[in-house]
Image (spheres, grey):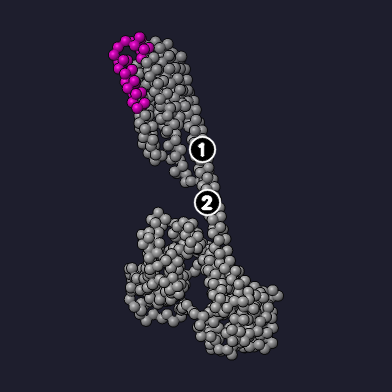
Amino acid sequence: MSNPAPQSQAVQAQLTALLFRNAGIGQAVNLLVASLLAYLGYISRPGPVIVFWWAWMCALSLSRYRLSLRFVAANPAADQAATWRDRYVRSIAMISLSWLVGGGLIMWGNSDPYRFMVGLALAGMVAGAVPILAPVRLAFRIYAVTILLGVALIVFAFAGQSLHWVFGILTLVFLGGVLSSANYLNQTLEASIQLGLEKSELVAGLEKARNDAEAANMAKSEFLATMSHEIRTPMNGILGFAQLLMMSGQTDEERQEQARILFNSAQTLLTLLNDILDFSKIEAGKVELERLAFDPGQLIHESVRLLTPPAVEKGLAIEAAWHGATGQRYWSDPNRLRQMLSNLIGNAIKFTAKGHVRIEGREVERDGDRALLEFSVSDSGIGIPESKRKLLFRAFSQVDSSVTREYGGTGLGLSIVRRLALLMDGDVGIEDAPGQGARVWFRIRASLVGAGEDTRQASRARPFLRTDAPRPDAEHFVLVAEDNPVNRVLVEQTLKKLQIRCQIVDNGLGAVNAITSGASPDLILMDCQMPVMDGFTATENIRRWEREGDRLPVPIVALTASAFQEDRDRCLAAGMDDFLTKPFTIDDLVVMMEKWTQDR
């Protein structure tokens, strides 16, 4: 329900409109009764005074009628209704006083029948005004009190017998009755209008809720349709080329090409899942930004190196430049910045058939130890029409459906960039001309790393790794706890290709038994969700056994499909040392091996 003050103002505005709407009938009755009283006055006491009074009453009635016409033409807003109401109340005060003057002229010096006739006529005028003036209490009170109290006082003034006193007292009683009736009618009208407003507000709220629900349902349907298409496309490549790889009679070159396409299809599917996961975390407010030291120039260089191969495949020139001070470092979240840059660069490559992609960064402004950094990606691609730009950073949106069919994608990437930029106290934007390419940028606020400031404890994000990266020493031994048969075979064969000895167990209890029975692995890859004993319990038991025997802790790395921050926190709380999310690449496994076995 809305604020009571504005609603009360709306109620009063409608009551004022009702007052003006009834004005036409009131003025017609005024002219008729004024003419009749003027006639009675003239035949009883002919003279110019009564004629002047009648002309004055006609002028007042016409003036009030014109005021009502101006109100209808102006159709004032609720906050202007009080001004119009005040004008009407002033006109009521004038005409009620005029009625009293006219009635007094006729009653004074005339016989009792004339006096009583005029008094009853004025009382009838007041009674008839109840439904007309009741919408505004002040208007009716001025009208009724001025006329009826005045009549009673005139009667008391010439009272010479008890009948006069009775008539005067009855007039006052009648005044109290009509005031009470008008007050009750006013309350009824006010309650009715307020109920109508609340009903209208409720209906509007229900209509909005229905529209929102329909829009959400439509967005859900469109999202499911898009997801179905986007998931089925790479899955078709994975299943199709996996079957081709199993067929006989193919050359090594054909198998290599099929494996490459299968790998790229899986990477596309993984990117899709990561985008959905990132978006859901941002929507739920579960994204926690890190505060790490980074060099923007190095960040741009690493992002470009990551996406140079697909640009080269399309024959695109890819350029990069940092237009700030060389070696200047800042505090922010370089991992998220790398993700944002990769999204923009990936889009630029995807939508550019020929020409170039250029990545630039600069410091826009500096305020003390805070700086506004801008990163931009420009290309010579298809561009975006002005009318479609508002869709660009909206979740699940692309410029049109043909873009999805031709280039693929869910429309989540730029939405993620925008939301991350806002989390970093920045913004996003686009400058382009259709057919001439586009320049998409985002800005973030970052703190400067001061001269001599210690950044050694800040985690350094690892650069992109190639599959020909150095391999761990073949003498290393890894214990793997994994219940899924496919994943067991994958890890075993991967370690075998890396010439690393391994022992495979299918649950956490097997890992505990292996360690307590004398196995001395250099690293344990521990799945978290397993039957018999899960990875968390197994890790806690291994750490307890190590502490009791004062043994050197074995590095334990979580090997899990759970990718949320709370899953990582739970793994670390159980005693694990690191976190490797499925699906992982060979490079990911190599990095983890090098990180935890280089000193063993």
Query: In this picture, is 572 found above or below 522?
Result: above
The x and y percentages for residue 299 are 41, 75
Which of the image's four quarters has the C terminus?
bottom right
Q: Secondary structure at mark 2?
A: helix
From the viewer's perspective, is 357 left or right of 476? left
User: Which residue appears farthest toward the right when viewing the image?
Assistant: 532
* Residue for point 47% across, 17% down: 166
Q: Could you say which disc has been placed on residue 587 in the image?
A: none
Q: Is residue 152 visible?
A: no
Which marked residue is nearer to the observer: mark 2 or mark 1? 2
The stretch of residues the image draws in magenta is 38-66
- Please give the residue where the numbered disc 2 appears in the rendered image: 215
Judged by its main secondary structure, the magenta piece is: helix
Depth order, front residue of 326/250: 250
Q: Amino acid at mark 2?
A: Ala
Q: Amino acid at mark 1?
A: Gly
Specify which label sits upstream in the sequence, 2 or 1: 1
User: Which residue appears farthest toward the bottom when viewing the image?
Assistant: 475
User: Which residue appears farthest toward the left when viewing the image?
Assistant: 48
Depth order, front residue of 151/529: 529
Q: CA distance from mark 2 to mark 1?
A: 28 Å
Indicate the quadrant where residue 351 lies: bottom left
Depth order, front residue of 497/377: 497
From the viewer's perspective, is 74 left or right of 466? left
Q: Secondary structure at mark 1?
A: helix
